[in-house]
Amino acid sequence: MVQRDFEIEVAGETVPGVIWAPAGRGSACLAMGHGGSQHKKTADVRARAIRYASRFGWVSVAIDAPGHGDRVSREEAAEEQRKTLARLRGDAGAVSLSSAEKNSYLNALAAQAVPEWRAALDEVLELGVVADGAPIGYWGVSMGTSIGVPLLAAEGRFCCAVLGLGQLHPDHAELAAAARQISIPLRFALQWDDEIRTREYGLALFEAFGAREKSMHINPGGHLEIPAAEAESWESFYQRHLA
């Protein structure tokens, strides 16, 4: 297994990325979208990518989302992690955006991240680490879903996706429109006791997806408590659709 760092330039921004690949050319490619206040090499993404490369021969690629990872200072990254943990704990002083502010932020995030992801896929394919015509899947929960939904709507190279820990606010017309455009097979993970997502809004996002083949797995527990068995089920999902 080989880990390879790369950088691309998109709209005047330097976007750092990383590829995990098996020896030889991979039989499939997975784009891995990290969560909020995390980065491209966060532990669960890295561990899953290494497992996929060594066990299944799949290439995984991740990039730092706008305002995350190597695109900000260590102090800024630590401050964002502090804010996220405060929200998860339900601290009284935790920073909270209004629904309109949140929707506006997510729209701006997607507007920047989607072309960056498309350029990253171009880079991976040009490097020749994936077999010609190999299928491409997506994985991303929480912020990885907030970016993943508009990305999947805009990019036709994906054949399947695992999403989760996301939601659709009734006033978020742009996200609803993107969700309706997604027709590839989907798996969606929802935590029933999520501290920072509204249960009904999570169900609404799943309902909005235009895919005919879609399934939802609901597990008890909070935002950070997706069980190991759920991650194992993702492997089976990908094995079916990346064959």
Image: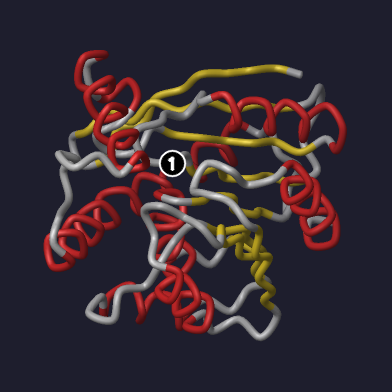
Quadrant occupied by the N terminus:
top right
Name the residue at 30% across, 74% down: 169
Labels in figure, total: 1
Q: Residues within 10 Å of mark 1 (few under 14, many from 20)?
A: many
Mark 1: secondary structure: loop
Name the residue at 51% across, 35% down: 62
Q: How is the image coloured?
A: secondary structure
Q: In this view, does 36 lie to the left or right of 19?
A: left
**Residue of label 1:** 35
Name the amino acid type tagged 1. Answer: Gly
Residue 239 falls in which quadrant of the image? bottom right
Residue 6: x, y in percent? 46, 22
Residue 11 falls in which quadrant of the image? top left
Residue 150: x, y in percent? 39, 65
Query: For this rendering, which residue is in front, 173 or 241?
Result: 173
Residue 187: x, y in percent? 66, 65
Name the residue at 30% across, 32% down: 9
Determine whether 86 is above or below 165 in the image.
above
Q: Is residue 171 left or right of residue 7?
A: left
Q: Which residue lies furthest to the top in this view?
A: 74
Query: For this rendering, which residue is in front, 81 or 161?
Result: 81
Residue 136: x, y in percent? 66, 53
Name the residue at 68% across, 65% down: 217
